[in-house]
Image (tube, rainbow, N blue to C red):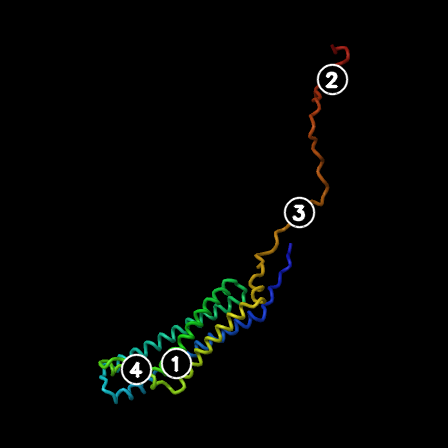
Amino acid sequence: MSYPVQAPPRRPGPVVSAAAVLLLMAAGAVAYAVASLLITGGTVDRFRTAAAGTGAGGGEIDTVVSLLRASTVLSAVVGVLMAVLLVGLALGLLSGRPGARVFTWVVSGLGLLCGCCGLAVLVGQRAAPLRLGADEQVTAELLALVGDAYPAWWIPLNAAMSVAQVLGYLLVAVLLALPAAGAFFRRAVPTGPPPPSAAVPTGPMPPAVPTGPMPPAVPSGPTPPPGDRP
């Protein structure tokens, strides 16, 4: 016996839009990670050239270069992992999983916090450069050269990425809070076809079995002649 296949509920526009924003942010994170790795070589070369004119020794310059390379690789790895997480959240939203909606809100809150902090750090570095003690003046000078060694478009790109991150997470959180999205995630998910109903017999009914007292048994032997009867 076959059962009709129920069509999956149609995804509302807010859910599709939220998933699209997450996928777009994931692509941006991967692109940013790749770009940061590609510009590292040129940034290091420009930094070494600028640092050669200071009083820093070779060991100090190598230490800053090592920190620069390590921070770049770490940032790229975090960006790729974040992209994978965002893709997973987008797929979970499109499949209608309520847990994906809640987890997306959590990630959006953390993303808003990180984006605001990153934007504040960029503004703070430009408004108030790092100031160290007199014995660490060379280190402060080298760190200032690191910012100048990046391409001219890199710092504005970081600021734009931070702003886009804040707006993107905020938009996703708002879209998932709309009534249409809430109804989509609260829907009843069918777990399988309905159980078959009990079959009703269509043939002849069996004879009824008597339920009263049984009649006395009739002897089955030969009947005696009338003269022999007592």
In this view, the mark in front (1 or 2): 1
Residue 195: x percent and y percent? Answer: 61, 51
Q: Quadrant of the C terminus?
A: top right
Callout 1–callout 2 Cβ contact below 8 Å: no
Task: Classify 10 Å Cα crowding around label 4: few (below 14), some (14-19), many (20 and above).
Answer: some
In this view, the mark in front (1 or 3): 1
Looking at the image, tell me whether mark 4 or mark 2 is earlier in sequence order: 4
**Residue 106 vs residue 187: left or right?**
left
Looking at the image, tell me whether mark 4 or mark 1 is earlier in sequence order: 1
Residue 198: x percent and y percent? Answer: 65, 47
Looking at the image, tell me whether mark 1 or mark 3 is earlier in sequence order: 1
Question: How many angstroms separate mark 1 from mark 2 (CA)?
Answer: 125 Å
Callout 4–callout 3 Cβ contact below 8 Å: no
Residue 46: x percent and y percent? Answer: 32, 87
Q: Mark on residue 143? A: 4
In this view, the mark in front (4 or 2): 4
**Residue 131 vs residue 39: left or right?**
left
Please tell me whether mark 1 sits on a helix, a strand or a loop: helix
Question: Residue flagged by tag 3: what amino acid is it?
Answer: Ala
Question: Residue flagged by tag 2: what amino acid is it?
Answer: Thr
Question: Residue flagged by tag 1: what amino acid is it?
Answer: Val
Q: Residue at x 58, y 59 (%)?
A: 188
In this view, the mark in front (4 or 1): 1
Question: How many angstroms separate mark 4 from mark 2 (CA)?
Answer: 130 Å
In this view, the mark in front (4 or 3): 4
Q: Mark on residue 199? A: 3
| Above-or-below relation of 205 to 12 | above
Question: How many angstroms separate mark 4 from mark 1 (CA)?
Answer: 16 Å
Q: Which residue is mark 2?
A: 223
Looking at the image, tell me whether mark 2 or mark 3 is earlier in sequence order: 3
Q: Mark on residue 123? A: 1
Question: Residue flagged by tag 4: what amino acid is it?
Answer: Leu
